[in-house]
Amino acid sequence: MSRQITVRVGQKRGDFVGKTHMVLQAAVDYVARLGGGTVRIGPGRWEMGNSLFIRDHVNLVGAGDDTVLRKCPSAATPLADDVDWYGTSVRVVNPRIFRVGGGILLRGKSPHFDRMVFCKHTVVAIEGDTVHLDRDTRDNFWTETHPEAATLFPVITGDYVNDVVIESLCIDGNRANNENLNGNYGGGIFIQDCDRITIRNVTSRDNNSDGMSWQVCDDVTVEDCRVIDNTDLGMHAGSGSQRSMVRGCTMIGNSQGFYFCWGVRESIVEDCTIEDSAKFGVSIGHRDTDNVVRNCTVRRSGEIGIQFRQHPEARRDPHRNLFEGNLIEDSGTRGDCVAIELAGTAEGVVLRGNTIRDTRRRHKVRNRIGLRIGESIERLTLEGNSFEGLDEEIVDLRAR
């Protein structure tokens, strides 16, 4: 039987000793060089001046919520000169905000297209006002569009990394002292093009971004995790992700609880609690097909409990999704208070055995609607759903 190494990282004792991202990364890279194993992170607050980059076959195991990876405050400065897509250094107005080994984000409007572009890097050297990067930028940042360099990054991240467990730790995004970072680039945990990642018993809180975001990732498992008070999405199953399994998780106080992005397929979200989302408890849309949301509680969503997003092209709507055994309660705070909104042209949706109710007094909210069915919805199956305390149980626009 093969054996793999385990190393311990502590703030006073361990195989690696320190208090910042540098010592955590050193331990991860050491274990990766030996073919994989486990890095055990002891209790304490770890100051994250850059992402902790996961590596193939290296597991991260903390001491529960006593192991806190806390994002350092962010700062930003304008670029002092152009950076082309092959650039490996950048001149900045204020180099003092950066540290060797720290994270740096280049951001700005593309000089070629009407969109923002972002590049995430690590600082490898600083000479005067020139900050050297770990690799070339692969985008253009030209001064006429007023680009910036900032100390923004995900707390834990990985690209093209497989077979990793992240377990029993807490991520503190320190959002009061950090600017927002788009959830397509950041979050408490942000992984892209990674397969077979397991996230278990992790708290991701107070990120000025998403709590957890995985993009173009297959076979991600998220178990018994908590995403709390994040500015953007709680959990973001990103574009092209297949076979995600999310179970037993709590999502509280995020802009949206669970977000199915583009082309998320054959994924399961079950036994989760989603509460106090500013907008939507669950949102599903562009080519998100053949997914299951089962035995979840979606409570006190600010706008809609479960939202089926509409795309202008019918073939891009979310088809063949099953919502079964869920409780959707007290949805919306103004206007039409809708628990489940089926917009667009979704086909083959099944709503089975859900409880949809409103416990609030009518003078506090108006027009409480259990289910609103868009006029182009086809082959919808409704079985054994119950409705309580609503002004209208079902509004079916197909019949009008």
Image: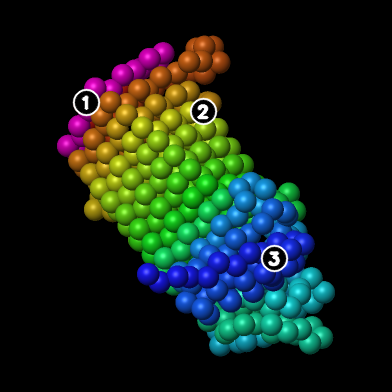
Q: Is residue 169 above or below residue 362?
A: below
In the picture, the disc for residue 383 is 1
In the picture, the disc for residue 300 is 2
For label 3, the residue is 14
Mark in front: 3 vs 1: 3
Which quarter of the picture shows residue 101?
Answer: bottom right
Q: Is residue 382 magenta?
A: yes
From the top left corner, tell me how far across and down residue 289 is, in percent: 27, 50
Q: Mark 3 packing: few (<14 Cα in 10 Å), some, or many (20+)?
A: some
Mark 2 secondary-structure assignment:
loop
Q: Is residue 286 above or below residue 394?
A: below
Tell me if label 3 and label 1 are in contact, CB under 8 Å. Answer: no
Q: Residue at x 37, y 69 (%)?
A: 1
At label 3, which amino acid type do we have?
Gly
Which quarter of the picture shows residue 124?
Answer: bottom right
Relative side of 172 to 256, left or right: right
At label 1, which amino acid type do we have?
Glu
Tell me if label 2 and label 1 are in contact, CB under 8 Å. Answer: no
Relative side of 142 to 298, left or right: right
Mark 1 secondary-structure assignment:
strand
Mark 3 secondary-structure assignment:
loop
From the top left corner, tell me how far across and down residue 41 is, in percent: 63, 59
Q: Mark 1 packing: few (<14 Cα in 10 Å), some, or many (20+)?
A: few
Seen from the viewer's position, the closer of residues 399 and 137 is 137
Q: Magenta segment range?
A: 377-392
Q: Earlier in the sequence, mark 3 or mark 2?
A: 3
